[in-house]
Amino acid sequence: MNTSSSTAYDVVVIGSGPGGYVAAIRCGQLGLKTALVEKDAKTPGIGLGGTCLHRGCIPTKAMLKSATVFAEAKDAADFGVKTSGVELDFPAVAKFRDKVVLKGAKGIEFLMKKNRVDVHAGFARLAGPGRVAVSGDGGETVLETKHVILATGSAPRDLPFLKADGERVLNSDHVLASTSVPKSILVIGSGAVGSEFASCYSRYGSKAILVEVLPRLLPVEDEEISKEIERSFRKKGIECHVKTAVEAVLPNPNGTVTVSAKGADGAEKSWTVEKVILAVGRRPVTEDLGLEAAGVATSKGYVTVDAFQRTNVPGIWAIGDCTPTIWLAHVASAEAIVAAETIAGVPTVPVNRDQVPGCTYCEPEVASIGLTEAKAKERGFDVKVGKFNFSVLAKSAMEHSNEGFVKIVSDRKYDEILGVHLIGPHATELIGQAAAFLRCEATTEEMIRTIYAHPTLSEAMHEAAEAVNGNCIHA
């Protein structure tokens, strides 16, 4: 193998997802000589961007956008627009999906050049203090560096008894490279990924079945949100089964599979479907990085870090899904900024884990930030709650779907807003203003005194704040 040594760097970032590329940009902005290593950069049609861009957030949301447009087009007559012959052209959906991804990848390439970040294509591993070995098509290159930021991300998990094969049993990677719509799907797992796929394919025309082993759908969300999403899914024809454990998936000669499961009451359940989608979480990608030899502490495969993203080894940092964090792209980006600024000696603030927005882009959309009602009570708060239904709003009446509500959880003693939970139209956009209120430690009174434009969907936030004290205007 050919081995060569390159220019020394202040920082080498391993992985170009929303954690890695943001870390590289911020390091470049701060005047640090920076390199970014990406194993997929040498793969035609992929390049930079990591899982989020190529096999996660972005292609999923592109497919969901097509599902929304398709559903709205079929119901266009409700808005006074005549249409005929509306049908889904999935090859065109895939083309749109891939176009969005390619644009993102090209954008990241431009940002690397703009911020003077050197990009190295290949698989990186720690090769001793201050050394990163990059194996690429031309052999192995050793990068000398003062700091290494691990941003290697995650990959879909399998079940102990069920592995995704890309044919009948699919994980998110397989789904996001799909070229056709199955007549029927069964999704195992009702977190954000599973709920989004069930919602997407149901609107495409598939018979969708959603199976969750826990007592409710979207189990990390506020309990009232979970109840509402299940009600909405069932109304839309999505078959939902909670407290149900899948026990076996067996192939049939005709290309279908039969899924066997058991409910909490011991009742046996069975479905025959064309495809199964595994949406049971993700695992960290930390194998073969040289962590053990470097002395980097790990737990269950995740890299252990402190509040400033430092590992136990000086000069080695970790961010995003390879750490035991909240596995969201925007969290990885926030952690990237903290790591880069700490390396550069710039004052910074660790990520507040209680103020991370979570979004699920199903129909209806779900978004939340802060404490759920149950979590707030667990922490000893005397809780006050306000709710307001979107259906009351004039602007909501103009939406294709106007179901759902805003729920605000606040502290009775100081009136501080502890959490905001939404289900309904454009919830994933509205959550941004809730994030600002929580960041400023705002009270419901301050939200009430904020003037909201009319007619807007954001008026639901104002009304929910009024409802905390029983003074809702339009309910």
Image (cartoon, helix red, strand yellow):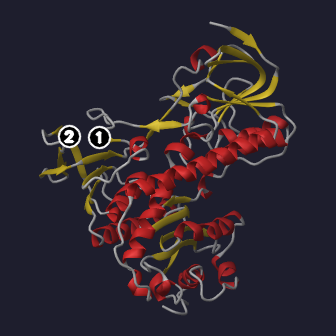
Q: Residues within 10 Å of mark 2 (few under 14, many from 20)?
A: many
Q: Which residue lies at the image location 62% right of the left edge and 69% below the top edge?
A: 434
Q: Which residue lies at the image location 52% right of the left edge and 60% below the top edge?
A: 359
User: Image height check: is 226 above or below 256?
Assistant: below
User: Image height check: is 373 above or below 290?
Assistant: below
Which circle marks residue 449 in the picture? none
Q: Amino acid at mark 1?
A: Val
Q: Which residue is mark 2?
A: 249
User: Image height check: is 239 above or below 399?
Assistant: above
Judging from the image, what secondary structure is the residue with disc 1 in? strand
- Say which quarter of the image contains residue 117: top right
- Say which quarter of the image contains residue 201: bottom left
Q: Give coordinates of residue 186: x percent, y percent.
A: 26, 51
Q: Residues within 10 Å of mark 1 (few under 14, many from 20)?
A: many
User: Image height check: is 157 above or below 414?
Assistant: above
461 sits to left or right of 271: right
> Quarter holding the N terminus?
top right
Q: Is residue 364 visible?
A: no
Please state which of the two labelled residues, at mark 2 or mark 1, is closer to the viewer: 1
Judging from the image, what secondary structure is the residue with disc 2 in? strand
Which is more toward the observer, 290 or 87?
A: 87
> In the current view of this chain or complex, which residue is farthest to the top?
1
Which circle marks residue 169 in the picture? 1
Which is more toward the observer, 215 or 461?
A: 461
Q: Which residue lies at the image location 30% right of the left edge and 63% below the top edge?
A: 205
Q: Amino acid at mark 2?
A: Val
63 sits to left or right of 136: left
165 sits to left or right of 391: left
Mark 2 touches mark 1? (CB < 8 Å)? yes
Give the mark nearer the N terminus: 2 vs 1. 1
- Say which quarter of the image contains residue 342: top right
